[in-house]
Image: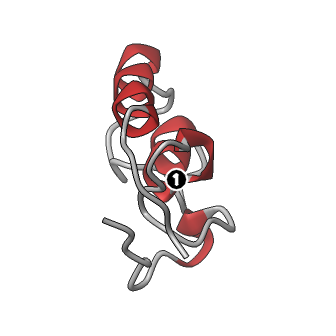
Amino acid sequence: RCKSPIAAGSGSGGRPFDIVPGHPEQSITVFRMETTDPGAMMPELGRSTAHDEGVALIAEWIAKMEGVCG
């Protein structure tokens, strides 16, 4: 489950893994969905705000995951 990013650069927000089970706040995926920084946001094109409901849904899914990264 724990996958280090290949080429996230500043898009990682200093987080080491794409998804950290049980910890959406430590997951690159949630960081990239929340940010409006053009160099880090996901999707990269076509938005200037975060979709709060979408971020909450993914964060809830990650929070319910079991496991550890290390």
Q: Of the residues shown, which amino acid type is indicated by label 1?
A: Ser
Give percent across and percent down for residue 41. 48, 50
Position of 21 relative to 68 (above/below): above
Quadrant of the image containing the C terminus = bottom right
- Farthest top residue? 53
Q: Residue at x 49, y 61 (%)?
A: 68
Residues 17 and 43: in front is: 17
Count neighbours of disc 1 (C-alpha within 10 A) and say few if under 14, some if 14 to 19, many if 20 or more. many
- Farthest bottom residue? 6
Residues 35 and 29: in front is: 29
Position of 16 relative to 52 (above/below): below
13 relative position to 43: left or right: right
Give percent across and percent down for residue 60. 41, 25
Secondary structure type for disc 1 = loop
Give percent across and percent down for residue 20. 48, 56
Position of 44 relative to 62 (above/below): below
- Farthest right residue? 14
Quadrant of the image containing the N terminus = bottom left
Give percent across and percent down for residue 44. 37, 53
Q: Quadrant of residue 35?
A: top right
Q: Residue at x 44, y 21 (%)?
A: 56
Position of 65 relative to 28 (above/below): above
User: What residue would you read off at disc 1?
Assistant: 27
Residues 66 and 54: in front is: 66
Residues 57 and 36: in front is: 57
Q: Residue at x 39, y 69 (%)?
A: 2
Q: Quadrant of residue 65?
A: top left
Q: Residue at x 60, y 50 (%)?
A: 37
